[in-house]
Structures are given as structure tokens and as C-alpha cells.
Amino acid sequence: MNPDILFTPFTSPKLTLKNRVAMAPMTRQFSPDGVPDDAVLQYYKRRAENDVGLIITEGTTVNHKAASNEVRIPGFHGKALDSWHKIVETVHAAGGKIAPQLWHQGGMRRPGEGAYPDYPSATPSGLVGPGKKVYEALSNAEIDDLIAAFTQAAKDSKDLGFDTLELHGAHGYLIDNFFWEGTNQRDDQYGGSLVKRTRFATDIVQSIRAEIGDDYPIILRFSQWKQQDFTARLAPSLEELEQFVKPLSDAGVDIFHCSTRRFWEPEFEGSELNLAGWVKKITGKPTISVGSVGLTEEFIATYRGGEAEVASIDDLITRMEADEFDIIAVGRALIANPDWVTKVRAGKFDELVTYNQEMLSQLI
Ligand SMILES: Cc1cc2nc3c(=O)[nH]c(=O)nc-3n(C[C@H](O)[C@H](O)[C@H](O)COP(=O)(O)O)c2cc1C
């Protein structure tokens, strides 16, 4: 099938891209003391030179002592900001665009991990999973500090020249800990109904808006599934999905990045639409889809050492031609093939390389 649809420009009120391929955010842990070095810069530069439309960086942690479980995960504060600035300039010089993925790990950071091992992890109800209480619930003052940390990171993103930013609200980390009742049992304004569980995220978005204005594009990544439970669903029905995304959209999210492990899976019975397809339909806003593009195996399976071979992207092309979603994020295929975009555009599918876990041992 002709993949041209992938290479048409993306236009939206606050963000334009030269094509519809984004690099999915992927943690690489190659930043000594949380500061991305030249190897990290070269890694992103290679993808920009090879025409990735939008690079979403690996998760980079906001300025909070419990944000990170690993000192080689890049921070988004202090000394790291100079490095990020160089990366932005390099990506722009290569004709690319770039967003930081702003991250706080919440309950996924285990006791004793990270640069501040004695500091307790931050999670809305002290839960690291359903029924697993390890910490004290966050106080309202602590929640205000976390909102302020995300807001400062957003301001820095804009000041450093990033084209947009992505809030990591997926996969069982802090923002998702608030979304999911398995980790949010609060009975104040931040918990209770599904809508109230969006409050932490909407407070962050509104606080960012108040600080940096309406013109800067904000992407929110969310997922139904959690690392704590792959079968969990924030919104088991279409009605619940509507309840969930509306306050986020109203608060000022511009683009929803709907994280699924296989992009072709229908979200609800009776329709082929995937999660990104439904969110686009409900909100009228652009969406990003993701999950096993061009590969035979989903990413959790390959974490456990498996390989993922090159697979057809015909179904992706069909869905994008039908305008089901606007942008496709590509993860592991872009680790294996920094030139994935240029190869696919040239129809050189037979030159694409299989992905395997060992590729994560270095930045290629
Ligand atoms: C090594 C690795 C690191 C990842 N780190 C992140 C991350 O920091 N933030 C995030 O939202 N998702 C992360 N993910 C998930 C990817 O963004 C993506 O959703 C997933 O790999 C599925 O896309 P793929 O099948 O094209 O690889 C990671 C995935 C991999 C393989």
C-alpha cells in the first residue's frame, strides 16, 4: 500500500508538523546524574535528520525529590536544562520538532530508589496498586507542590524553545495514579468519581495555562492499561470515556496521545475504532495513536527478551486514510531504525531491521 498519508503535513491551531510520524517517548537511562550528554543529543539528532515529524523525548522528570527512581533518567530541571536546550537547537537545525515528556513516577518509584532514596514516593492515597498501601496519602500542600513542579517544567519547556510538551499521564505513574481508582481512594476534590479523579491533571493543565498562556500546545498521554494491571480500564464504556476526556479537553489539552500496546485493537465492541479514534470523535481534537507499529510483538513482551519482527503497516495506512487519528507514534521500530521514516517513505520495507531487546544496551 502507498504510505503517502503518513507524509502529509499535520496542521492544528497551535502545532504544525511536516508529517504524521512521532517518535514515542522511550526511557533510555543514558543521562549521567540526570543530565543528557552528547550521545543523547546525537540519538535525537539522528531521528530529526531522518525526518521524524515530532520527537517526543524519553520521560524527563519534574523537579520533585520522588519523581525519579533512577539517577540516569534525565531530569527536567537544574543542570539538565542546558543540555535540553542544546538538544532543542540541534533538532531544529535538522528540521525537526521536539516535545519533552514531563514525568513523575508516583507510586511506580519503589521505596529506596532514586537520588533521594529516603524520600517517600508520592501517590494520591499511599497506594502502589489496588489494596497495596505503602506510603501516606499526599496532603493538599504536597499536591500543590507537585502541580507547581509540572508548571515550572512547562514554563522551562516553552523558554527552552520546545515546540510543545507532553504530560505523562499514562501507564501507572503519578498523574495516572490519580486517574485510576485502584490507586486513588481519596474522598476530597481529587478523588471519588471518574471526573473528580481527573482533577489533578486538570489543575496541572490550568496552572500551566495561567503561567504560559493559551498559545502553547499541550499534549496529554493517557492509557487504559497500567503496569500494575494490563487489563485495567479507566473508562470501560464509551460513556465513561466521554466523562473522562471532557474535563481534560475543557481544561486546555490540545492533543491526546492515547497509549495502547497494539494500535489495531478496537476499544469498544461494535466498532473498529481504536482508543485514539474514539477520543478524536468525542473531543474533536487531534489524537496520536501508538502500539506495535511495523512490528509483530507488543513492547512488554519484548521487554522480557523477545524479538519483534518487521510487520506490514497496511492497516495503519487504512486507518490514517480514514482520518481515524492524526499522528502515529512509533517506538521500538525507531530504535531499531533511526531512518524508519525515510525508509518507509521510499518503500524500502525490506531494508527495515528487526527489533530486539539488546538494542537498548546502547544509544544507536
Ligand atoms: C525502552 C522503552 C522505554 C519506554 N519508556 C517510556 C516512557 O518514558 N514514557 C512513556 O510514556 N512510554 C514509554 N514507553 C512506551 C512507548 O512510548 C510506546 O508506547 C510503546 O513502546 C509502544 O510503542 P511501540 O510498539 O511502537 O514500541 C517505553 C517503551 C520502551 C520500549
Image (spheres, rainbow, N blue to C red):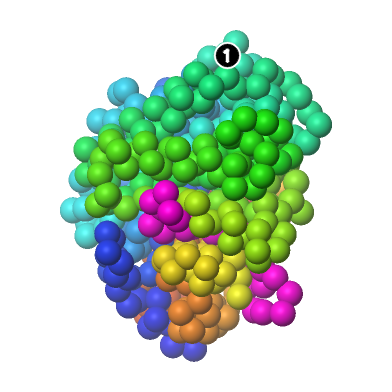
- Per the image, label 1 sits on a secondary structure element best described as loop
**Residue closer to the observer: 245 or 42:** 245
Nearer to us in this view, 251 or 112: 251
Q: Is residue 304 above or below residue 340?
A: above
Viewer-proximal residue among 9 and 281: 281
How far from the left and from the top, in percent, is residue 123? Answer: 62, 28
- Lateral position of residue 297 relative to residue 364, left or right: right
Q: Could you tell me which residue is drawn at 35 percent across and 58 percent down?
A: 54
Q: Which residues are magenta?
A: 249-272
Residue carrying label 1: 119
Residue 83, percent from left and from top: 28, 33
Say whether residue 34 is visible: no
Q: Residue at x 53, y 40 (%)?
A: 199
In the image as oriented, which residue stretches furthest toward the right?
131
Q: Which x, y percent locates residue 43?
A: 37, 48
Q: Is residue 120 visible?
A: yes
Residue 255 lies in magenta, yes or no? Answer: yes
**Snapshot quadrant of residue 121:** top right
Most extreme residue toward the top is 118
Quick check: 39 left or right of 236? left
Is residue 63 one of those drawn in magenta?
Answer: no
